């Protein structure tokens, strides 16, 4: 019996792994083809693979009832109004920012989108293949869910619909504001359409609401169902296209090169280009706050516990506190570069020669301080974009006909990741990255170790990390295999192997930077996809992410200042 169970588990994990591989091969094929119809024959392989896979983040995608948490996760990462569009066009940065079209930016994913007309939405792709895979996966989920709706509401071949649908349509198309009674009546009919309870929809309702559109859930369900009905009755299939310019530019590091050149020009302008450089991939607040919050927030703004200060700074209501820290940082040599290249990766540069360390939490060894190191902080990359940006930045720059190599002393990566043992807010220290779907493994010497963080008040795990092709494609069978196999996997993320590929290419192949460059990786857990209700779709970290973020940041800075 035990042997059979193990065999079945392996089989399901292998099926899932094959489904992911099939999805990526199919998406590349469709991209090269230039267009496809997600609910037509050309989109069949993608649909079948996703339904076979049944990723945790998409919950009940394989069941008849609609998936609410997965739907919220997806619509927060796609442009508002996409559910109304029959034509979705993925483009490069082709000048729409200079037009009358207003950019639509999804709340949980920084990408520029443009509503061209009633039927078409354009989505700008500036972050590489990972972004295309992410969008196509979400759209496949969205369209599968839409056909669940149409199947429940169409009652005859001529397109006749059930009473519930007619009542929902009436509520959505009404020009007057819904009363509480009218809203609850509409929720009742929508619950029947989605195969969910009135209570489930009532709880989900406010999560979907946005400014100016309090009835957004009704709106999304109606338009998804309406277009699915038209596909079923009139065969007017929704279409996804890839612009010729996007197909030509993809993989050529167009945006990464502009991004890197802009930064190196700024370093040269301030006389920092040939100084020792420490690169940190992180957010745009933790390094700045770690260095300057103590000096900036005194008196009534000071907290007994430094982590309470960091929590206050992370609260969107406290913009005045953040402004004080930022002002002090700029006075102490911080340079901010707002991205204009399309990568959506902003930059902070800290000149340590201008920092008054007596007003910080850090002691800076004098012999290290004499080196006048520069700390270069880059915002989070997305998937393959990590390779594109870091690879371009580590290349030498031509100054007055002379090739100048950057003196990169260390590269530190702090990121969010899914954890396979433990929970939200725990810390993972990787010893190697395994690239999912390939034979590529990236072992490295991590300057950070478990013992560095054991006394910091957070749970710490050490082992290998899987760099996945997409976090939204993992299911429990694959994750259990990762966890229980001899790979000793502790978590999954999307950028580690890509960063490591760039580092190894620059240090060991091109010779752009020193081979002895110090590397640090640490991740804090944003979710545990093996726990029921523990996926990213169930909600964010909230304040539980503050402590691990700053614990890791502080340890990285201590090592930079005292190594």
Image (cartoon, rainbow, N blue to C red):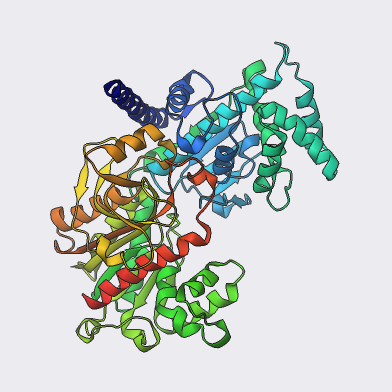
Q: Which residue lies furthest to the front in this view?
A: 1
Q: Residue 457 at x, y = what percent?
A: 38, 66
Q: Is residue 173 visible?
A: no
* On-image quarter of the C terminus: bottom left
Q: Residue 205 at x, y = what percent?
A: 69, 43
Q: Residue 515 at x, y = what percent?
A: 14, 61
188 relative to 213, above or below: above
Residue at x 60%, y 24% (from the top left corner): 147
Residue sitting nearer the eye, 288 or 390: 288
361 relative to 549, above or below: below
Residue at x 67%, y 38% (from the top left corner): 200
Residue sitting nearer the eye, 196 or 383: 196
Q: Residue 311 at x, y = what percent?
A: 52, 69
Instruction: Answer with left or right where residue 345 lies relative to residue 142.
Output: left
Q: Quadrant for residue 562, please give it.
A: bottom left
Residue at x 40%, y 35% (from the top left corner): 476
Instruction: Answer with left or right where residue 410 lies relative to residue 189.
Output: left
Instruction: Answer with left or right where residue 177 lies relative to residue 134.
Output: right
Instruction: Answer with left or right where residue 311 lies relative to residue 192.
Output: left
**How many circles with numbers are drawn on the protein?**
0
* On-image quarter of the N terminus: top left
Residue sitting nearer the eye, 386 or 295: 295
Q: Quadrant for residue 285, please give it.
A: bottom left
Q: Quadrant for residue 180, please give it.
A: top right
Q: Can residue 345 be seen in this view?
A: yes
């Amino acid at each position: 019996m035990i042997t059979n169970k193990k065999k079945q588990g392996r089989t399901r994990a292998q099926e899932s792994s094959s489904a992911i591989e099939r999805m990526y091969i199919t998406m590349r094929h469709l991209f090269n083809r230039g267009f496809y119809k997600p609910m037509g024959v050309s989109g069949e392989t993608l649909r079948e693979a996703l339904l076979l896979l049944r990723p945790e983040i998409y919950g009940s995608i394989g069941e008849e009832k609609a998936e609410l948490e997965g739907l919220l996760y997806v619509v927060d990462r796609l442009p508002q109004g996409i559910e109304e569009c029959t034509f979705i066009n993925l483009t490069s940065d082709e000048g729409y920012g200079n037009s009358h079209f207003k950019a639509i930016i999804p709340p949980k994913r920084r990408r520029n989108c443009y509503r061209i007309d009633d039927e078409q939405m354009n989505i700008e792709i500036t972050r590489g293949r990972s972004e295309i895979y992410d969008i196509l996966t979400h759209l496949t989920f969205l369209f599968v869910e839409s056909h669940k709706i149409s199947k429940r509401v169409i009652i005859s071949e001529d397109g006749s619909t059930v009473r519930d649908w007619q009542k929902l349509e009436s509520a959505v198309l009404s020009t007057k504001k819904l009363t509480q009674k009218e809203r609850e009546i509409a929720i009742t009919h929508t619950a029947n359409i989605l195969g969910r309870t009135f209570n489930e929809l009532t709880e989900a309702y406010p999560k979907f609401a946005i400014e100016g559109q309090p009835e957004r859930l009704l709106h999304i369900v109606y338009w998804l169902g309406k277009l699915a009905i038209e596909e079923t009755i009139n065969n007017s299939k929704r279409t996804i296209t890839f612009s010729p310019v996007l197909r030509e530019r993809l993989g050529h590091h167009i945006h990464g090169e502009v991004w890197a050149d802009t930064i190196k020009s700024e370093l040269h302008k301030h006389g920092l280009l040939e100084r020792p450089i420490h690169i940190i991939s992180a957010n745009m607040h933790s390094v700045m706050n770690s260095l300057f919050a103590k000096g900036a927030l005194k008196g009534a703004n000071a907290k007994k516990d430094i982590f309470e200060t960091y929590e206050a700074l992370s609260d969107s209501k406290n913009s005045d506190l953040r402004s004080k820290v930022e002002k002090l940082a700029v006075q102490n040599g911080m340079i901010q570069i707002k991205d204009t290249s399309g990568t959506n990766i902003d930059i902070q540069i800290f000149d340590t020669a201008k920092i008054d360390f007596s007003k910080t939490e850090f002691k800076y060894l004098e012999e290290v301080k004499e080196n006048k190191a520069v700390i270069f902080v880059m915002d989070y990359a997305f998937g393959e974009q990590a390779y594109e940006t870091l690879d371009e930045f580590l290349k030498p720059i031509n100054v007055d006909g002379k090739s100048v190599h950057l003196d990169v002393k260390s590269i530190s990566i702090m990121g969010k990741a899914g954890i396979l043992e433990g929970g939200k807010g725990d810390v993972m220290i990787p010893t190697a990255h395994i690239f999912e779907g390939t034979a590529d493994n990236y072992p490295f010497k991590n300057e950070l170790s478990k013992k560095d963080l054991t006394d910091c008040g957070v749970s710490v795990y050490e082992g290998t990390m899987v760099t996945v092709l997409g976090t939204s494609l993992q299911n429990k069978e694959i994750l259990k295999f990762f966890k229980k196999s001899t790979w000793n996997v502790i978590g999954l993320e999307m950028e580690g192997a890509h960063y490591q590929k760039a580092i190894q290419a620059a240090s060991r192949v091109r010779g752009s930077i020193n081979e002895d460059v110090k590397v640090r990786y640490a991740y804090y857990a944003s979710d545990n996809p093996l726990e029921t209700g523990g996926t990213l779709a169930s909600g964010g970290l909230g304040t539980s992410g503050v402590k691990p973020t700053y614990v890791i940041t502080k340890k990285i800075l201590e090592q930079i200042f005292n190594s």
